[in-house]
């Protein structure tokens, strides 16, 4: 396929446009001169094949970003394995196959850094895929995401479809899920620190040992990387997207407390799982394609907290 791929004038479907990633893609694509196509999940359930194919036949997008997915933090993944496996398998199979049947020119599927083995070499290169056992707390989600990457590779190999994939590290930003039972660590700590500050609590509960290392990418950086890959990449390789920086959960909790203005103690809850010890992605490939992140963690965290105060805390 000839590169760069031009998005101008193209009908572009962001599948999952109401999620945190989908919203960021919609914001980012506003400057690309393309025609955005979206459909809400009440009008179309992407887990239903006939509905999805019928909608695609009528909407006729030329480009697709697959940001629709069942997502959640460590506890949601661990306690709802059927939903994380079935919903994600169904969504990606229907969207990817349906896109091929209507002749979509280019598609980008969003995977996740949890596709790599629990004890993969760090930073994790794309070549680490399928080289060892997965982290048990999110293996259901990981297996579904691996299947999505493999679908893109299979449709490329058998039919010549220009379907690519991106593997983001842990994401955060405006539009995040702040529900303590289902969220990821960063929004959970923001919500907990805010509540502790408002209530004048003495301490902030943090799950696990605080020792696992995580990398955090602002969702606006991810959206920018996705557009860069869509326009500059045409390869079966599932490209990693990250910052190259990691910190411990303890250090993250300390930074959140500083940004939120909570001065109490951290209390670690050993009854909650740590998950994978470390998952830093190797971004050599993406940097080689000419992309680098822009949003630093402190600045991104301050923005996410401002969004939380305005949209979640203010609403009670
Ligand atoms: O972000 P998180 O839920 O998921 O948790 P993963 C990361 C780490 O933060 C774990 C700890 O060690 C948690 O125990 N943690 C501390 C907390 N306090 C909290 C809290 O209040 N809430 C949460 N949620 N965690 C996810 C996968 O793994 O990574 C998904 O489950 C996805 O499938 C995503 O791949 C990128 O980073 O462990």
Image (cartoon, rainbow, N blue to C red):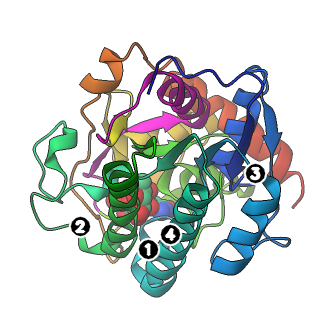
Q: Give whichever of 98, 195 is nearer the camera.
A: 98
Secondary structure of the residue carrying numbered label 2: loop
- Magenta span: 209-237
The 10 Å Cα crowd at callout 4, few under 14, some 14 to 19, many 20 or more, is many
**Is ligand 1 less than 8 Å from the beta carbon at label 1?**
yes
Respond yes or no on whether mark 2 lies under 8 Å from ligand 1. yes
Closer to us: mark 3 or mark 1? 3
Give the position of the C terminus as an image quadrant: bottom right
Ranked by sequence position, the earlier of labels 1 and 4 is 1
Identify the residue under disc 1.
Answer: 77
State the mark number for residue 60. Answer: 3
Q: In this view, does 43 lie to the left or right of 285?
A: right
| Circle 4 residue | 93
Q: Can residue 184 be seen in this view?
A: yes
Instruction: Give the spatial CA distance, label 2 vs label 4.
Output: 23 Å
2 displayed left or right of 192: left
Q: Residue at x 81, y 54 (%)?
A: 59
């Amino acid at each position: 396929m000839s590169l760069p791929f031009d998005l101008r004038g193209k009908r572009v479907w962001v599948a999952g446009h109401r999620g945190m990633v989908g919203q960021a893609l919609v914001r980012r694509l506003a400057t690309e001169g393309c025609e955005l196509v979206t459909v809400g999940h009440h009008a179309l359930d992407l887990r239903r094949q006939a509905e999805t194919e019928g909608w695609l036949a009528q909407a006729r997008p030329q480009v697709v970003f697959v940001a629709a997915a069942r997502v959640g933090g460590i506890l949601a993944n661990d306690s709802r394995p059927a939903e994380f496996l079935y919903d994600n398998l169904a969504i990606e199979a229907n969207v990817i196959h349906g896109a091929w049947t209507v002749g979509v020119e280019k598609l980008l599927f969003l995977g996740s850094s949890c596709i790599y083995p629990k004890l993969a070499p760090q930073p994790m290169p794309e070549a680490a895929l399928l080289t060892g056992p997965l982290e048990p707390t999110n293996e259901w989600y990981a297996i579904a995401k691996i299947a999505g990457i493999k679908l893109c590779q299979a449709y490329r190999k058998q039919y010549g479809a220009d379907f690519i994939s991106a593997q983001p590290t842990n994401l955060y930003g405006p539009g995040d899920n702040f529900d303590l039972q289902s969220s990821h660590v960063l929004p959970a700590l923001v919500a907990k620190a805010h509540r502790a500050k408002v209530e004048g609590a003495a301490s902030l509960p943090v799950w696990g040992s605080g020792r696992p290392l995580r990398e955090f990418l602002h969702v606006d950086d991810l959206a920018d990387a996705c557009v860069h890959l869509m326009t500059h990449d045409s390869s079966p390789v599932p490209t990693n997207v990250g910052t190259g920086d990691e910190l411990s959960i303890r250090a993250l909790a300390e930074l959140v407390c500083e940004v939120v203005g909570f001065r109490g103690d951290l209390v670690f809850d050993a009854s909650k799982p740590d998950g994978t010890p470390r998952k830093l992605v190797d971004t050599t490939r993406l940097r080689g394609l000419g992309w680098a992140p822009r949003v630093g963690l402190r600045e991104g965290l301050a923005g996410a907290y401002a969004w939380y105060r305005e949209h979640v805390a203010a609403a009670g």
